[in-house]
Image (cartoon, helix red, strand yellow):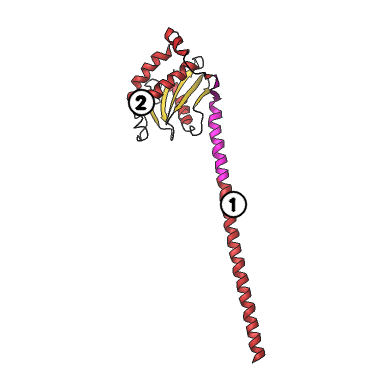
Amino acid sequence: MELTLIARVRDGLILATSIEGNDRGGDASMVKYSNQAKMLFKKLNGAPAQQTVESGPYVFHYVIIQNVCALVLCDRNFPRKAAFQYLNDIGQEFLNTYSTKVDQVVRPYHFLDFDKYIQQAKQRYGDTNKYTMNAVSNELQDVTRIMVTNIEDVIHRGEALNILENRASELSGMSKKYRDDAKALNRRSTIFKVAASIGILGVLFLMARFIIF
């Protein structure tokens, strides 16, 4: 497990991370994947509650629990069941400890002290050769139904949705402008008709006076 992050779902704010593999001076090779993780966090609205996202020789696994998302970057050969059990473990423990504070923080990495628990969880789930891992895996959910996608698809999907939203907004604006123009035209037409009627009545009135007098 190369990188672990916990973020707030509504805005992607990173709340906690493991000391190894963090993007604040860690392994330079992880900077690319840390940036990809941040992009994934920005795409969480409407995303599946659990997902695997492939990126080169690695895969991101994440789970959304209530208002937080726990994410881990693993080698492709790392067992998915172990990864998702690890994520559910740290996600639940994080909420048990900080749930009342999650929506209040404004600075990233506010809960760095949670790294201690992350390291303990890594030791429990990281060694897949342990007998205890085999025992735990029997209790895990079936992960074969969890969606697997590609990092580019996730990022571009978000961009495509943004384009569609922008176009829909533009069409809505054009439609509103058309309705406003139509209303203005109708008002001008009504005013013109009233003015014309008044003008005709005025002419008739003058003609009547001329004939009478």
Distance from Cα at disc 1 to Cα at disc 2: 49 Å
The reply to whether callout 1 and callout 2 are in contact (CB within 8 Å) is no
x and y, in percent, of residue 57 in the image: 52, 18
Position of the C terminus by quadrant: bottom right
Mark 2 residue type: Asn
Is 150 inside the magenta-drawn segment?
A: yes
- Residue at the spot of label 1: 175
For the record, the magenta segment spans 144-168
| Residue at the image point whose x is 49% and y is 23% from the top | 60
Q: Secondary structure at mark 1?
A: helix
In this rendering, position of residue 196 left or right of residue 158:
right
Q: Nearer the viewer, residue 73 or 130?
A: 130
Q: Residue 96 has which mark?
A: 2
Position of the N terminus by quadrant: top left
Q: Residue 22 has which mark?
A: none
- Residue 130 in view, yes or no: no
Q: Nearer the viewer, residue 33 or 60?
A: 60
x and y, in percent, of residue 89 in the image: 41, 20
- Residue 183 in view, yes or no: yes
The single residue placed furthest to the right in the displayed view is 211
x and y, in percent, of residue 26 in the image: 39, 22
x and y, in percent, of residue 170 in the image: 56, 47
103 in relation to 128, above or below: below
Task: For label 1, count other residues whose C-alpha is less than 10 Å away and answer few (under 14), some (14-19) or many (20+).
Answer: few
Dominant SS of magenta comes to helix
Q: Secondary structure at mark 2?
A: helix
Mark 1 residue type: Ser
User: Could you tell me how many numbered marks the image carries?
Assistant: 2
173 in relation to 89, above or below: below
129 in relation to 161, above or below: above
| Residue at the image point whose x is 64% and y is 78% from the top | 200
